[in-house]
Amino acid sequence: MAKRASPGIRPGLDRIGRLLSLLDNPQGKYPAVHVVGTNGKGSTCAFLASVFRAAGYRTALYTSPHLENPGERLLIDGHPLPPERWMACAERITQTMGQDAALREDPPSYFELVTATAFLLAEEEKTDVAVVEAGLGGRLDATNLLSNVACTAIASISMDHTEYLGDTLEKIAGEKFAVVRRGAPACYLGDVKALVPQFRRFCSAVGAKPFIVSEDARVDAVNVAEEGCAFDFSASGITLNQVRTKLIGRYQVVNAALALSALSCLTERFDGLTESAIRLGMLRARWPGRLEIVSRDPLVVLDGGHNLDGVTKLAESVAELWGNKRIGVVYGVMKDKDYPECLDVLNGLHCAFYATCVPGMERSLSPEGVAAAAGRGLWRNAVVGFENPLDAIAAASRENEVVVVCGSLYLVGWVRSRLVRNQEAY
């Protein structure tokens, strides 16, 4: 499929729109919850999909990027489909493209082709509901061609991908808010108060029903621990005392509140969304690679936060949970990311630092480059570089009580595939 795709990132809907039309628009054959935002999209999707599954609905979950295997991008009831299903569907799409002159001359990008394949597979799997994460932005993202959106959920918005989405928070938010659908509920986290009026204007323009979590819901009695989180949640028509989730970190309570807000807007359309189903789904939700504990002795935590907002939330969570322990950070990053600011945030943890890279990946900054960037800070001990992340983890484990592996989803995926076995369904 990659060989037939246009290279690079090419925002726009004409190519994939034409392709989906030729495929009889599978993206409209099932209701969907569309999730956009900068950080927290994946966790919000994981909560939503888990609740729909607990409620008895055959659920498709489409997310990106993947951690270890491309098949993770589409899960049906928590499980990836066999590779031969992907191959058969991709072959159908390739044939369709080959029969159309416009698509032969200007083929969709790789992400657009994967998205079209996932939409088609979700239809073939007789999906009751799909939870779909936007890839980049929203307005011009391939996922924005979903034509049966039951609810839009908008997670935290911060500065990222400015070369595509704009150089101000308002411009980036505009790209996200543009996905709200006429007549459908739209839930925005509302963590940036200055963006709330802009969100309301977008909703008003298309007749969408706005829900601002920070204003229209209450989250109380929050408890955050290594084992997970618990909190009280209330919104119009729904009150849940001590909802529990195994996802850890205070920021996951925020993502959970967004998911619950979206679900509260969908209970009339999906009558299986009972209190018991919601509680069970929230408890069962998993989202690998996000503040995920993969070892207890020593304690090794993986987190894919790779922009300033994500790393800030990671550092806050690590400080809250393990601030009284010796912490070692194993860090690897892509060359094109804004890593100096992220390193400054991690420096605030007063941790030992172990620079590494993603083996075999040209985009990855070398351990020497990471060490040089980190060396500007006042780290607790000398910055050490390792070509192999597992060697870095081993060294950090000998010298610290908690090891945090972070900086890139690619790094987390590489490490996770070598440390975690017998993976459960998502």
Image (spheres, helix red, strand yellow):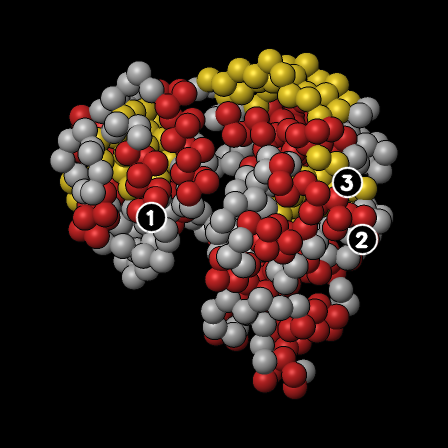
| 251 horizontally vs 240: left or right | left
The mark that comes first in sequence, 2 or 3, is: 2
Q: Which mark, by number, is residue 294?
A: none
Residue, x 52% and y 73% (percent of image)? 5
The mark that comes first in sequence, 1 or 2, is: 2
**Mark 3: which secondary structure?**
strand
What residue type is disc 2 on?
Ala
The mark that comes first in sequence, 1 or 3, is: 3
Quadrant hosting residue 33: top right
Q: Which mark, by number, is residue 210?
A: 3
Residue denoted by label 2: 205
**Mark 1: which secondary structure?**
helix
Q: CA distance from mark 1 to mark 3?
A: 35 Å
Residue denoted by label 1: 339
x and y percent of residue 362 in the render?
A: 29, 61
Observer-nearest residue: 161 or 260?
161
What residue type is disc 3 on?
Pro
x and y percent of residue 153 in the render?
A: 68, 42
Residue, x 19% and y 48% (percent of image)? 372
- Using the rendered image of the protein, determine whether residue 71 is visible from the camera's viewpoint: no
| 395 horizontally vs 259: left or right | left
